[in-house]
Each structure stands twice: as C-alpha cells, then as structure tokens.
Image (spheres, helix red, strand yellow):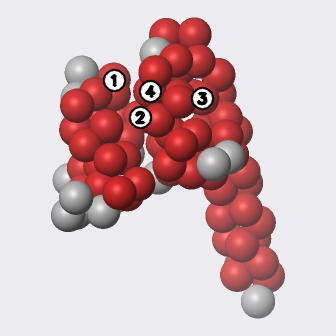
Amino acid sequence: MIEIETLVEEIFRLYTGLERTGIRAMDALSLTDPELVAELLATFESRDKAGSWLARRMAAFGGCCALEMLSQGERESVTSVLHILRVGLEE
C-alpha cells in the first residue's frame, strides 16, 4: 500500500502544479491578451477555473491543452471552443 500512497502524493503534487501553471497563464495572458482573459472569465466566472481549463488536455484540441494551442498561434481555435462552451453549439 505504501507504493499507492506514494503515487497518490505524486498525483496531488502534479495537479497542484497544473493549478499553479493555470494561474500563472492567466496572469501572463492578462498582460498580453486581456480580451482573451475577458472571454475566459465570461465563460468560467473564475480565474482559478479558467486557469485550470487552460492547462487541461482535451479532445477538442487533439489532446493538447488550450495553453499549448495558444503557444502555437491557434488563438481562434481556443476562442471558438470558449464560444461553444459559453453559448452552445446552436445560436
């Protein structure tokens, strides 16, 4: 059982690191792309939730996270997914 407990602690540290990275991403985007930060906050209503979303890998981005997409110049893909999350597939 000690092996499992060690793994649980490792997972906790990884998730904590991801949360911190998401918060740092929100801070960085506040300086470089405040319009995108406004869209993130309109969608998630919380800097923590928005930051978490930025750092989470998802199928919508082919297994990448939104932050990776932004670093590859795929801002439109990120805003498109945000729009779908906010208003749905049909308008």
Classify residue 60 by image quadrant: bottom left
Look at 63% across and 48% down and name the residue there: 45
Residue designated by label 4: 36
* CB under 8 Å between discs 2 and 4: no
**Sooner in the amino-acid sequence: mark 3 or mark 2:** 3
Cα distance in 3D space between marks 2 and 4: 12 Å
Residue occupying the far bottom of the picture: 1
Disc 2 on helix, strand or loop? helix
Residue designated by label 2: 67
Q: Residues within 10 Å of mark 4 (few under 14, many from 20)?
A: some
Which one is in front in this view, the residue at disc 3 or the one at disc 4? 4
Mark identifier at residue 71: 1
Which one is in front in this view, the residue at disc 1 or the one at disc 4? 4
Q: Residues within 10 Å of mark 1 (few under 14, many from 20)?
A: few
Residue occupying the far front of the picture: 91
Classify residue 76 by image quadrant: top left
Residue designated by label 3: 26
Number of marks present in the image shown: 4
The kind of residue tagged 4 is Leu
Disc 4 on helix, strand or loop? helix
The kind of residue tagged 2 is Leu
